[in-house]
Structures are given as structure tokens and as C-alpha cells.
Image (tube, rainbow, N blue to C red):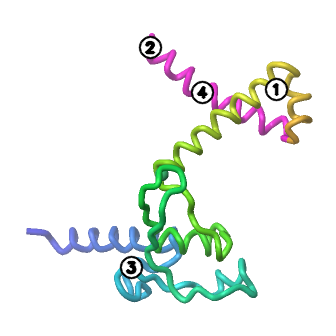
Amino acid sequence: MKSSRHRRIELTRRRAARKKATERIGYDVVSDKKLVTGMLASDPQRLAKYAPDGPYIRYYEDMTFQCRECDSPAVWRAEAQKEWHEVCGGHIFSRPKLCHTCRIEVEEMRNINRKKHIEGLVGKYGVEEASRRLRMTRERIEAYMRLWAAPAKKNQESER
Ligand SMILES: [Zn+2]
């Protein structure tokens, strides 16, 4: 049997979790802001910031689309749409093109290519010149290099 103290602690914990989730995605996860299952009310003020004259989205609804890369059907969740349009400032007409798996693959590829590109330039010309050519600050390049160097170093250490 749970004591009232335990129940109180549990309740406080749940409230805190709900508050955190609400702040993170910008709508109340429990209350009626979710109109019907799968339908999510928009926040006009947030939307107006990114599309002052654009068409007005009243609510978001899970949307299916076909991945341009692998042709498989994918779902763009209402929550993700809301975050994209209202938090990330994604254009009102923008739609996803890739499924989750393909997007991750593309991002990984992009990171690998960027790493090769930056490391190549640094290796060839040194950080100063690479920074000029990349129009990136020296600090940012060095931060990237540290980031890329870190996991390898960790592996070496764990192998010992
Ligand atoms: Zn795909």
C-alpha cells in the first residue's frame, strides 16, 4: 500500500515531467489542446512570427508522404509539424522529403563529407588558411577537430 507521502511525491514528479514536456514541445500534452486524436491546435502567435501574411494553419494532423529516396510511405506527425513550423521556423509550405531512416543516412553522409572537407583543408593549408577558405572561425574549426578526435581517443583508451 502506498503512503500518502509516496503519492504526493509521485504526483509532484508527474507534474514536473508534464511541465517539462509542455515546455519542450510547446503545447500541453495532457489538456484539450489536442482537439481530436491526431489533431493538434496551432499557436497563431508563433506561426505569425514566421509567416506573417501566409496561409493560416488552424491545426496539425498526421500527414503521410512518400520518401523521395526509398519510396516507402512515411508519416509526418502532427507534433513534429508543430515544432517545425512554430519552433524551428520552417516555412508554411515546406514538407518533408525523406523518411526517418533516409534522413539519418543523408545527415551521416553530409557529416562525413564535411569532416573530410575540413580535415583536408586543415591538413593542406593549416587552420588559419582553412578558416579563411571555409569562412569559419578558427575556434569553430578547432571545436570540430576536437569533437572528431574525441571518440577515437576514447576507443584507444578502452582498448588498452
Ligand atoms: Zn526513405
Q: Which residue is mark 1?
A: 121
Q: Residue, x 56% and y 70% (percent of image)?
A: 83
* Crowd tier of the residue under label 3, counting other residues whose Cα lies within 10 Å: few below 14, some 14–19, many 20 or above: some
Residue 140 vertical position relative to residue 23 in the rendered view, above or below:
above
- Relative placement, left or right, of 30 versus 140 is left
Q: Residue, x 75% and y 87% (percent of image)?
A: 53
Residue at disc 3, secondary structure: loop
Residue at disc 2, secondary structure: helix
Q: CA distance from mark 4 to mark 3?
A: 42 Å
- Relative placement, left or right, of 155 versus 146 is left
Q: Which residue is mark 2?
A: 159
Q: Looking at the image, tell me whether mark 4 or mark 3 is earlier in sequence order.
A: 3
The part of the image, by quadrant, that contains residue 21 is: bottom left
Q: Residue, x 34% and y 82% (percent of image)?
A: 37
Image coordinates of residue 73 in percent, x first then y, are 42, 61
At label 2, the amino acid type is Glu
At label 1, the amino acid type is Leu
Q: Which residue is mark 4?
A: 150
Residue 159 vertical position relative to residue 112 in the rendered view, above or below:
above
Residue at disc 1, secondary structure: helix
Q: Are marks 4 and 2 in contact (CB under 8 Å)?
A: no
Q: Looking at the image, tell me whether mark 4 or mark 2 is earlier in sequence order.
A: 4
Q: Looking at the image, tell me whether mark 4 or mark 1 is earlier in sequence order.
A: 1
At label 4, the amino acid type is Ala
Residue 25 vertical position relative to residue 146 in the rendered view, above or below:
below
Q: Which image quarter is the C terminus in?
A: top left
Residue at disc 4, secondary structure: helix
Q: CA distance from mark 2 to mark 1?
A: 30 Å
Residue 119 vertical position relative to residue 134 in the rendered view, above or below:
above
Q: Main secondary structure of the magenta part?
A: helix
